[in-house]
């Protein structure tokens, strides 16, 4: 008996489903927008995973000398800024500056003081973000005159810096990681709950189905934003927990879709055949129903991820999501919106990143729908 | 039709009751209370405050009292905005939100259906692709990106419209656009899809055979069928628009009720949160009803008798 079920359950759907997936793949390959989206998503995913490791700056490192500098592919500091910055760095050193000059990458400063010069004044230069390796070249015999040199530290801020002087490029990379991670996590939770709930309701049918779906209806009619804000109130400072909770809210659509599919699958011959062979409900669900709903579920999942990313960005925008110094695209956009008057880069780059990410996910979702759902074409 | 509407409204009462109950208890389950501050209040002060607002009663009793007051139309005092009752707060903010949302709604319907119809009439032309591109853009980009960018371009860079507040008609332009853009996109997409189908349908072909002018056919016959999906989408969307958008109101500094959703919950302002939840739920119920009635009006096959 069990042997027979295994044969019938193992052979038939596999052959059928493989051809379905193959045709779907062929259709997907023809869809330029979807294929391009896959590459873009792959690239953004790699950026999120490996970007923060190879980024030139730590996402939380603050450069007080470079607050809100504009995006640039050439290095900071600018040649014109070096000397004024050196002067201002040495202002507290109580030196009369005789000479401040740049020679290539090396800054030379000659200062005098009537009360004698302490050799430790070099630390004023080191303390600035612009200079490293400040050293004393020569101290005059009476100790009132000092010549020192420092190397100019060349830093690259491809996307500029934020209001605290943190490198925006590194912050965009880490926020990609956070946003994608949260999107996948919450969508995964929604997927598991939604599929199990929907398949169970649809498969059991009758009164149980009715009850289970009424619960979904009531949850539907609660204002969504209220739900989310309540979750924030509960889980406040723990973003991971919060988005597991968001996943627990987002499963409603998934449950409805899967239930609908299950209702129709249940009447199909292969399910009846499995039932006639005495396969248990759980096994039928696992073996026949859920794999057959997978196409729709995958489509919905690709559309759910951007939804969750948007939600996270929205919450972070309101200041309820990811907390400093960690960051997400929503946080960066919200900061950008506050500073757009004097630092438009802070808004443009995160907004552009989010837009590209959402576009790619949406195009891929549409492409998958076209590929997997032959009725729609 | 009238009796149907009344029956529907009565049928919504259990739903509203469920929502109110769920919201009430979920809010109370959340840790913290409305009078918690950085430095804890003195125990007696706290006890007095709790007694004044009836928070010292057992939860079920508070619930019964709240429901009783609600039936009499009293939403209770706000815990945080001490001098105001919840209905006063809502009475100040809601008209602003409704005005803004109503304009956005009207704009979305008009522009969305116009774009969608034009795209459908010239299917697969450059115009069509243009509309699809704009619609995809509008759906994808969230309004907390659109709104600051609009501000940046039109208020700061070109200085055409004011950057915030509500003084004169100019100050409505940017928020209305930011609010309606995603809706325009969805409506245009829905109308385009339905219009392409409607233009191929028998009744439109018959109208063409009668020799009616294209404009007549499109507006009177095709659009009537094509706007059904858009209308069922717009029902819940309208409820969301009219009850205030948190993001747009925050960015443009508009004193609507959107902000109370967030602030109320964060301050544990129990009554205010309940007030906003009830307002949203009422709008959802009402707009679902309006959608169903519009359906009957537009599609003669739908009957509610």
Image (cartoon, helix red, strand yellow):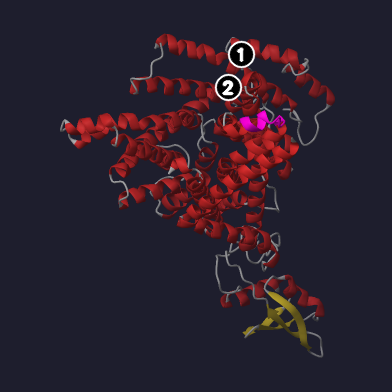
Drawn side of residue A35 relative to residue A330, left or right:
left
Quadrant of image for the N terminus of chain B: top left
Q: Residue at label 2?
A: B278
The main secondary structure of the magenta stretch is helix
- Residue A111 x/y as whole percent: 72, 82
Q: Residue at x 51, y 38 (%)?
A: B249
Q: Which residues are magenta?
A: A272-281
Q: Residue at x 60, y 20 (%)?
A: B85
Mark with earlier residue (2, 1): 1
Up/down of A86 relative to B56, above or below = below
Q: Is residue A277 magenta?
A: yes
- Residue A253 x/y as whole percent: 58, 34
In the displayed orientation, state which residue is furthest to the bottom.
A141
- Residue A73 x/y as whole percent: 55, 71
Which mark is in front, 2 or 1?
Answer: 2
Tag 1's secondary structure? helix
Q: Report in which chain the residue with disc 1 lies.
A: B
Q: Residue at x 64, y 72 (%)?
A: A155
Front residue of A220/A164: it is A220
Q: Residue at label 1?
A: B70
Q: Is residue B138 magenta?
A: no
| Residue B141 in sight in this render | no
Tag 2's secondary structure? helix
Drawn side of residue A322 relative to residue B13, left or right:
right
Q: Are discs 2 and 1 less than 8 Å apart at CB?
A: yes
Quadrant of image for the C terminus of chain B: top left
Front residue of A186/A159: it is A186
Co-location on one chain, circles 2 and 1: yes
Up/down of B96 relative to B133, above or below = above
For label 1, the crowd category at 10 Å Cα-Cα, with few meaning under 14, some 14 to 19 and many 20 or more, is few
Front residue of B218/A340: it is B218
| Residue A27 in sight in this render | yes
């Amino acid at each position: 008996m069990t042997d027979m079920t295994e044969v019938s359950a193992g052979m038939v759907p596999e052959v059928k489903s493989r051809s379905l997936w193959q045709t779907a793949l062929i259709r997907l390959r023809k869809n330029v927008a979807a294929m391009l989206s896959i590459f873009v998503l792959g690239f953004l995913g790699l950026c999120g995973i490996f970007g923060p490791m190879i980024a030139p700056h730590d996402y939380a490192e603050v450069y007080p000398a470079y607050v809100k500098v504009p995006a640039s592919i050439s290095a900071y500091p600018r040649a014109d800024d070096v000397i004024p910055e050196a002067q201002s760095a040495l202002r507290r050193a109580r030196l009369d500056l005789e000479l401040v000059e740049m020679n290539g990458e090396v800054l030379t400063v000659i200062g005098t003081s009537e009360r004698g010069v302490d050799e430790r004044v070099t630390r004023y230069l080191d303390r600035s973000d612009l200079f490293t390796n400040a050293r004393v070249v020569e101290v005059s015999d009476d100790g009132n005159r000092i010549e020192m040199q420092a190397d100019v530290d060349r830093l690259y801020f491809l996307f500029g810096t934020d209001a605290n002087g943190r490198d925006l490029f590194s912050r965009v990379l880490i926020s990609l990681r956070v946003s994608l991670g949260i999107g996948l996590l919450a969508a995964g939770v929604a997927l598991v709950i939604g599929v199990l709930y929907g398949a169970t309701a649809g498969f059991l049918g009758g009164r149980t189905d009715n009850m289970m779906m009424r619960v979904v209806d009531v949850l539907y009619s609660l204002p969504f934003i209220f739900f989310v804000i309540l979750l924030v109130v509960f889980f406040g400072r723990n973003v991971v927990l919060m988005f597991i909770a968001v996943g627990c809210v987002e499963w409603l659509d998934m449950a409805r879709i899967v239930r609908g599919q299950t209702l129709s699958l249940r009447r199909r011959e292969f399910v009846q055949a499995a039932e006639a062979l005495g396969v248990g409900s759980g096994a039928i669900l696992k073996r026949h129903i859920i794999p057959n709903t997978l196409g729709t579920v995958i489509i919905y999942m690709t559309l759910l991820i951007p939804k969750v990313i948007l939600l996270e960005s929205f919450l972070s925008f309101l200041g309820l999501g990811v907390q400093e110094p960690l960051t997400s695209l929503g946080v960066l956009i919200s900061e950008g919106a506050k500073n757009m008057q004097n630092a438009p880069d802070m808004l443009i780059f995160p907004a552009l990143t989010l837009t590209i990410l959402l576009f790619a996910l949406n195009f891929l979702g549409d492409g998958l729908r076209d590929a997997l759902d032959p009725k729609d074409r | 039709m009238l009796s149907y509407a009344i029956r529907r409204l009565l049928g919504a009462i259990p739903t509203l009751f469920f929502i109110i109950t769920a919201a009430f208890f979920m809010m109370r389950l959340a840790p913290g209370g409305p009078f918690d501050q950085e430095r804890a209040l003195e125990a007696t002060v706290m006890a007095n405050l709790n007694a004044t607002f009836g928070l010292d009663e057992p939860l079920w009793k508070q619930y019964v009292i709240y429901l009783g007051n609600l039936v009499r139309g009293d939403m209770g005092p706000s815990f945080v905005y001490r001098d105001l009752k919840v209905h006063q707060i809502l009475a100040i903010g809601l008209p602003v939100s409704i005005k803004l949302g109503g304009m956005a709604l009207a704009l979305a319907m008009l522009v969305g259906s116009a774009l969608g119809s034009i795209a459908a009439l010239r299917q697969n032309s450059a115009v069509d692709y243009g509309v699809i591109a704009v619609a995809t853009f509008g759906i994808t980009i969230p309004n907390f990106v659109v709104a600051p960018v609009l501000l940046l371009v039109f208020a700061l860079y070109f200085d055409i419209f004011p950057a915030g507040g509500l003084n004169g008609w100019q100050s409505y332009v940017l928020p209305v656009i930011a609010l309606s853009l995603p809706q325009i996109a969805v409506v245009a997409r829905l109308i385009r899809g339905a219009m392409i189908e409607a233009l191929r349908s028998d009744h439109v072909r018959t109208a063409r055979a009668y020799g009616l002018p294209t404009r007549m056919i499109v507006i009177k016959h095709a659009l009537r069928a094509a706007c059904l999906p858009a209308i069922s989408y717009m029902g819940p969307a309208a409820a969301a628009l009219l009850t205030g958008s948190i993001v747009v109101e925050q960015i443009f500094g508009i004193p609507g009720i959107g902000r109370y959703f967030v602030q109320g919950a964060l301050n544990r302002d129990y009554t205010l949160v309940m007030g906003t939840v009830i307002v949203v739920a009422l709008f959802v119920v009402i707009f679902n009803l309006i959608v169903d009635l519009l359906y009957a009006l537009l599609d003669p096959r739908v009957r509610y008798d």
